[in-house]
Amino acid sequence: MTSALVAPSRAPGVELLGPMPGSGYRRPQALARRRDGQTVQLTPVLYALLELLDGRRGPEELAAPLSEAIGKTASSEDVAHLLERLRPLGLLEGPEADSVRKAQPLLGLRLRFVITDPALTRRITAPFAKLFAAYLVVPALVAFLAVCWFVLAEKGLASATRQAFFEPELLLGVFLVTVFSAGFHELGHAAACRYGGATPGAMGAGLYLVWPAFYTDVDDSYRLSRWGRLRVDLGGLYFNVLVADAVFLAWLATREDALLLGVATQLLQMLRQLGPFVRADGYHLLADITGVPDLFHHLGPTLRRLLPWHWSEPSPLRRGARWTVTAWTLVVVPLLAAMVLTGVLLFPRLVATAWAGGRVQVARLTTWDPVTAGAAAVKLLALVLPVAAVAFMTVRLVRQVAGRVWATTADRPRTRAAVVLAALVALLLVVGMWWPNGQYRAVQADERGALASVAAQGSGSARPQVLAPALIPREPDAPTLLLLPGPDGAQALLATGSGAEPVAATAFPFRVPDPPGPGDNQALALGTQDGATVYDVAYALVTVTDGSAVTNANTAYALASCTSCTTVAVAFQVVLVVGQADVVAPLNAAVAANADCLRCTTTAMAMQLVVSLNALPSQQVYDELATALGALDDLEGLDAEELWHVVQQVQTQVLNTLVDAGLVEGITTATATASATAAPSPGGTDAPASPTPTSVTTDLPTPEPTPTSSSAGESPTPTPSSTPSSTP
């Protein structure tokens, strides 16, 4: 009687999937699946031996049936040698079967958890498999093409986008449809597998890099023909088509344009899935077309055979499959390298954007409105995931490459030393790119994000922009602000109006404005230090009584002359007019300018509220207004859009406080924003070493030509904001 040591058997749970139809290998491979779900490719000889193992026969007894199966003579020594090759794969019963770890493929799914086991998956997919009948597939595809034409060419997505962003519940609905369609997509793969006659396995979710993703085990589809496997690969996309058709039917019934974004998200999801560069549907399509199950496994050998001294190295692939895999390798390697490099270069900007935007979204999470909080959670996730993805991808890539290089250079100390030196140089370059030097600033709305600008941000170079706008209010007697290059190249800040002569600025190179007068409010941020961030926030609460003139000025000045600097000024003034006022001519202005600036962002924002009250506020109202204005103390790190959002929130809270107290009779509001950012010059060539990029915008409330008066019980006529005029 033969003992277990000399009578090997297959490990528990091993499934024999058989030869793969349409294989791209010279010697068609056969597949077996372990209990842990790992699929293993085997040569025909190894697979034939694995089929013969029954736990009763040893190498001597297996030699004859193996010889008959492969058509060649195999001795007992040959059988013993083949068994030793099978043992490390975890396919033979013994301690190795439990100790072999499941392979972690490049760009594979991690942290999986099962939602439906194979038995439940089979029950769920049974009715959906009928959707692959030709009489249903053809009309669904025709309808999908018509829907795409209507949404993209006829209707458009502008109204849908506006409605979704102005109604958070609709945006959340589109998000939920997108999440549902991702799971429905995986159900399509499983249903196609079931329709072809194979057995789908577990369905679940995991993390792809750091992004949540669904998955379906369809390894059993290798039993199918090549067309059957292609149908499984395309099954998920077909179910996206069904979702898009259903969303369009819902739009026809409700006419809610935001639903059309659901069609757009399906198109984007399908396009993303068709990319053959990561383990998505396009990758599996290419793998099944070529008959090579794991394309990433051939990256290294293919690159090695491209070297002249390895041209004669034989390939296990057929000629057509070899050329296809070579072309795929030549595309995917530079693309992945570019993705990694771009991620490393943009990492500081991603961190700054996530931090600035995240603070706003975290504040919204604390609201009592579940819709607003849910939309904020979605936006916060969109901010955090790219940062986490870049960090994870970088760490994982470094670990994998370092481990592999360290193992392959064990017997070559000189090669290992050269690799270590190159790694240190690369590390120093990354540290230099990530070391804070003004690049940790949030992405601005006016940035193009072109490849050239990405490279410039990473290398520390940028091309400046030269602007010289003039800002002219509507009324001829209203104050006018001009910012023009002077004859000697210095900036000239000109103020005209009411017969005043222009006054040129020569210092700094700007003329620093005079301190604010009584009842005025001024924010003044001066950026003079390279790489520094300067924020100045000034807010004031002024009460005007006894018919005094309302001529309060609220101004924000952000002036910069530095490199890689951020200069922000925010002025917020509330003027409470109690009773009658004969003169109402407030001034609200924002000026942002930079000179001799490279990679600098300069932003000024002014908000002025002039509110007519029927009585003097109580101390409690004053305290509530002070609390509302106190929210402006924590603005550092926010970009222009986020600043504006916070300022609007403070404005709303101030007005609500006064309205709730029953004090408000009339309101005049004025806002002014200005920004100046160094960018490529209009001529398309680099500007001189001392560029003078400048920009000024302002909204000024238009005063009446003569003082306005109001009798008891009436409120002064609100004065509208002027439209800024800018001439480069």
Image: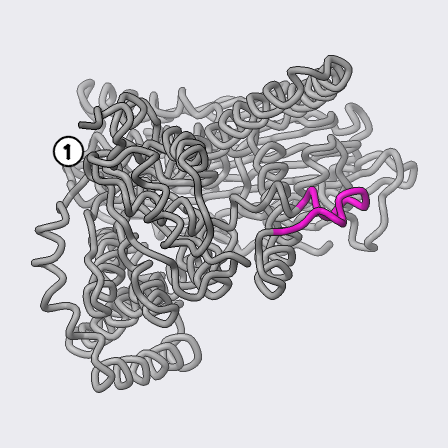
Residue 252 relative to residue 491: left or right: left
User: Residue 3, percent across and down?
Assistant: 21, 24
Under mark 1, the amino acid is: Ala
SS at circle 1: loop
Question: Is residue 614 magenta-colored?
Answer: no
Residue 509 relative to residue 24: left or right: right
Q: Residues within 10 Å of mark 1 (few under 14, many from 20)?
A: few
User: Residue 18, percent across and down?
Assistant: 32, 56
User: Residue 389, percent across and down?
Assistant: 45, 34
Residue 591 relative to residue 358: left or right: right
- Identify which residue is drawn at 49% across, 32% down: 393
Q: Which part of the image, by quadrant, shows the N terminus?
A: top left
Quarter occupied by residue 372: top left
Q: Which part of the image, by quadrant, shows the C terminus?
A: bottom right
- Identify which residue is drawn at 40% across, 20% down: 633
View extreme (right): residue: 488
- Identify which residue is drawn at 25% across, 29% down: 93
- Identify which residue is drawn at 35% across, 69% down: 225
Task: In this rendered view, identify the residue nearer to me: 679 or 175.
Answer: 175
Question: Is residue 304 magenta-colored?
Answer: yes
Q: Is residue 653 visible?
A: no
Task: In this rendered view, identify the residue nearer to me: 397 or 392.
Answer: 397
Task: In this rendered view, identify the residue nearer to me: 179 or 488.
Answer: 179
Quarter occupied by residue 267: bottom left
* Image vertical order of residue 610 relative to residue 562, above or below: below
Quarter occupied by residue 208: top left
User: Residue 538, percent across and down?
Assistant: 47, 23
Which segment is the magenta one? 303-315
Judging by the rendered image, the residue that carries numbered circle 1 is 661
Q: Is residue 33 visible?
A: yes
- Model colouring: one colour
